[in-house]
Image: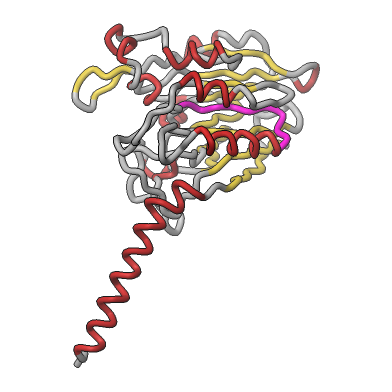
Amino acid sequence: MISRRQFLKGLLGAFLAGLFVSVYGFFIEPMLRLRVARWRISPPRWTGGPLKIAILADIHMGEPFVTLKRLKRLVTRTNALGADMIVILGDLEAGHRFVTRTVPMRDTARELARLTAPLGVHAVLGNHDWWHDRAAQARGGGPSAVAETLRAAGIPVLQNDAVKLGQGKRAFWLAGLEDQLAIGIGPMRFRGLDDLPATLASITDDAPAILLAHEPDIFPQVPERFALTLSGHTHGGQVRLFGYSPVVPSAFGNRFAYGHVREGRRDLVVSGGIGCSILPIRLGMVPEITLVEMA
């Protein structure tokens, strides 16, 4: 039989454990920690030679969670990785209602403009970038305020198009798909602005190609023409324990929740990203800069 003293000690232990998990999950991990997640892959369809790509996904700017000061540190650390190319995978806007002060997009873009890499810095938009744009929602489409602000800061935004990078045998195409959940059309119903055929049509020769797509759910439809797809959106589920995420914002659940996926001759890397959506919590999914090194 458990004594009253043992019961109280157990109750206190449970309370302290719960308190620690709450403080860690709501404050320490999402606000103070940052790691570099490295993936070394050899996609079967890649013929462009060694390439190092730094990925920033789902920054979700907004105080006190992701401040300009924190973004400055993030940019400095990303530059220090010495990547050949840096890609921004969308969702710069805040993703939850616990933000105490929004950060003007022009300030965010000005800081991101400090990113530098030999093959440039390239971006696509995410669903929150569209959802925060009331004018675009009313129009049912672009132009996007976030895209225009990034371009004004010197950061190109790919919207169902592609750009050829590199030279000679190391040349390749970088394509960017527009967001798949861009326009709200009803309660929890969305219409995408993505156009995969148009994106493919913008690739005009047989150089290898990489696709940027904010949401990974497009991956089953991505043809082998793309050696690699890079995505964000899921935040790795935000809570990920023992390689499993209980809640993932994807129709495919944990299939595309996080990390490197190879299906057939196609490769996908899903970044865990920086910020949070719905609730400002991360547990077992430390905010990350993702570094992909291709052989």
Quadrant for residue 290, please give it: top right
Magenta span contains residue 85: yes
Rendered position, 80 above or below 32: above
Instruction: Out of 247 and 205, give the one closest to the viewer.
Output: 247
Visible residue check, residue 33: yes
Residue 96 location (% of width, % of height): 32, 35
Which residue sits at x=64%, y=25%?
114
Magenta span contains residue 177: no
Which residue sits at x=37%, y=57%?
23
Quadrant for residue 113, please give it: top right
User: What residue occupies the far right of the structure in this picture?
Assistant: 168
Magenta extent: 81-90
The reply, left or right, for residue 253 in relation to residue 8 is: right
Quadrant for residue 190, please give it: top left
Instruction: Out of 26 and 126, give the one closest to the viewer.
Output: 26
Which residue sits at x=52%, y=50%?
33
Residue 91 location (% of width, % of height): 43, 28
